[in-house]
Amino acid sequence: VLPSLSAKLLDSLQDLSVQLHGDGIIHIHLEGGSGVLDRITRIRRQLQQAEGSLVVLNPAAGWGPEERLGPLPSHWQIVQQIKASLDPAEVLSPGWFDETSRI
C-alpha cells in the first residue's frame, strides 16, 4: 500500500495489532477462530481499493490459494507474459506465476 494511504487504512484497523513499514508493507496480526476469514476478506477489499494486496503468511490448515492470496489481480496476464519473456526456462521462482500452483 502506498505510504500516503497507510494512515487512512490504519484508522480502520485500530482493533488489531498492526505494523506499518515505510516501504508500503503492512503486517496485521489476526487471531484464528470463527469469522477470521470474513475479516480477512473485508481487509483484502480495503487494500485492493488502495491498490494493495493481502497475503496470509500463516494460514489455517486446508486454506487454498484463494484464501491465502486472494483473487488473481486484474493485471495477472500481463505479469505472466513479462515473466515468460524474461525467464522462458522458468529458472526464477518456478511455479510462482502459475495460477494453479500459487504458493
Image (spheres, grey):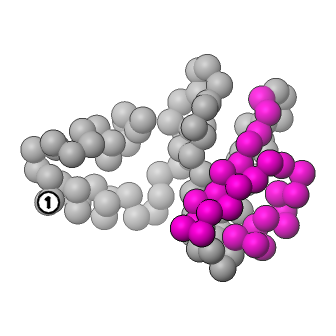
Where is 18 relative to 47, above or below?
above
* 55 lies left or right of 90: right
Where is 46 relative to 103, above or below?
below
Residue at the image point whose x is 59% and y is 74% from the top: 2
* 65 lies left or right of 56: left
Which residue is the site of mark 1?
85
* Residue interval drawn in magenta: 6-32
* 97 lies left or right of 15: left
Q: Position of residue 92 (x, y in %)?
A: 21, 45
**Can residue 48 be spotted in the picture?**
no
Any magenta on residue 72? no
Count the labels in the image. 1
Query: Which image quadrant: the N terminus?
Result: bottom right
| Mark 1 crowdedness (10 Å alpha carbons): few <14, some 14-19, many ≥20 | few
Q: Amino acid at mark 1?
A: Ser
Residue at the image point whose x is 14% and y is 60% from the top: 85
Query: Dividing the picture into quarters, in which one does residue 62 lie?
Result: top right
**Can residue 36 be spotted in the picture?**
yes
Residue closer to the observer: 74 or 28: 28
Query: Dividing the picture into quarters, in which one does residue 89 lie?
Result: top left
Q: Position of residue 34 (x, y in %)?
A: 84, 28
Q: Position of residue 36 (x, y in %)?
A: 78, 36
Q: Residue furthest right?
A: 15
